[in-house]
Amino acid sequence: MSAPPALQIREANAHLAAVHRRAAELETRLLAAERTVRAQAERLARHDQQLRAALDELGRAKDREISALQEQLLSSEAAVRSLQAAVDQRDQMIQQLQPRADLLQDIARRRPPLAGLLAALEEAERLGPLLAGNQGQLLPDGPGPPLSNSTGEEGQDKLQPAVFGTTV
């Protein structure tokens, strides 16, 4: 067989050189892409680690807040129980004092007539007892004999004078 012509060999060598350059260029780009991917992976790993740390801190903060709120809830429940006990105690006191309040209201409602009665008793006390000469006589407008403070006992010769007084 005959040897290929020199032109074909040069073209083949030029083609091989171009393929070799292209392969070297692609290897360089591949190395650069691998470095870029490795750097991005490292950045993503660091970012993932930072996010995990932040998430862990959020979890701890949430747990602290839940604990504080539980303590506050327990404190509030204790305060409610204390206030409820005070309300129950006051309700009992009201139930105990209600009859007395009703009595005082009844007394207050009856006060004006009692004041009039007391004024009449004071007027009677001011007038004093009847004189000895008038005790046996009938009052001109009265239906019967004058009133006395005798107890009805026999043997009492002398009548006691009527005395009005108040204990208020």
Image (spheres, rainbow, N blue to C red):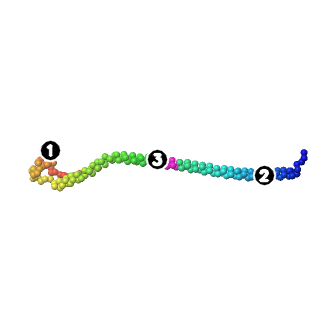
Q: Amino acid at mark 3?
A: Glu
Q: Quick one: label 2, few (<14), some, or many (20+) residues within 10 Å?
A: few
Disc nearest the viewer among 2 and 1? 2
Q: Residue furthest top?
A: 154
Disc nearest the viewer among 3 and 2? 2
Give the spatial CA distance, label 3 vs label 2.
Answer: 80 Å
Q: For numbered disc 2, what is the local secondary structure? A: helix
Magenta-drawn segment: 67-72
Q: Amino acid at mark 2?
A: Arg
Percent of width and height locating residue 89: 38, 46
Percent of width and height locating residue 72: 49, 49
Nearest the eye: 110 or 44 = 44
User: With 77 as the anchor, is 133 left or right in this view?
Assistant: left
Q: Amino acid at mark 1?
A: Gly
Q: Quick one: label 3, few (<14), some, or many (20+) residues within 10 Å?
A: few
Q: Which residue, given by chain and number where applicable, does mark 3 sit on?
A: 77
- Image disc number at residue 22: 2
Nearest the eye: 17 or 4 = 4
Mark 3 / mark 2, whichever is N-terminal: 2
User: With 81 as the anchor, is 135 left or right in this view?
Assistant: left
Mark 3 / mark 1, whichever is N-terminal: 3
Q: Residue at x 31, y 49 (%)?
A: 101
User: With 25 as the anchor, is 49 left or right in this view?
Assistant: left
Q: Residue at x 60, y 49 (%)?
A: 55
Give the spatial CA distance, label 2 vs label 1.
Answer: 153 Å
Give the spatial CA distance, label 3 vs label 1.
Answer: 74 Å
How would you classify the magenta stretch by its main secondary structure? helix
Q: Residue at x 76, y 51 (%)?
A: 26
- Image disc number at residue 111: none
Q: Which residue, given by chain and number where applicable, does mark 1 sit on?
A: 152
Q: For numbered disc 3, what is the local secondary structure? A: helix
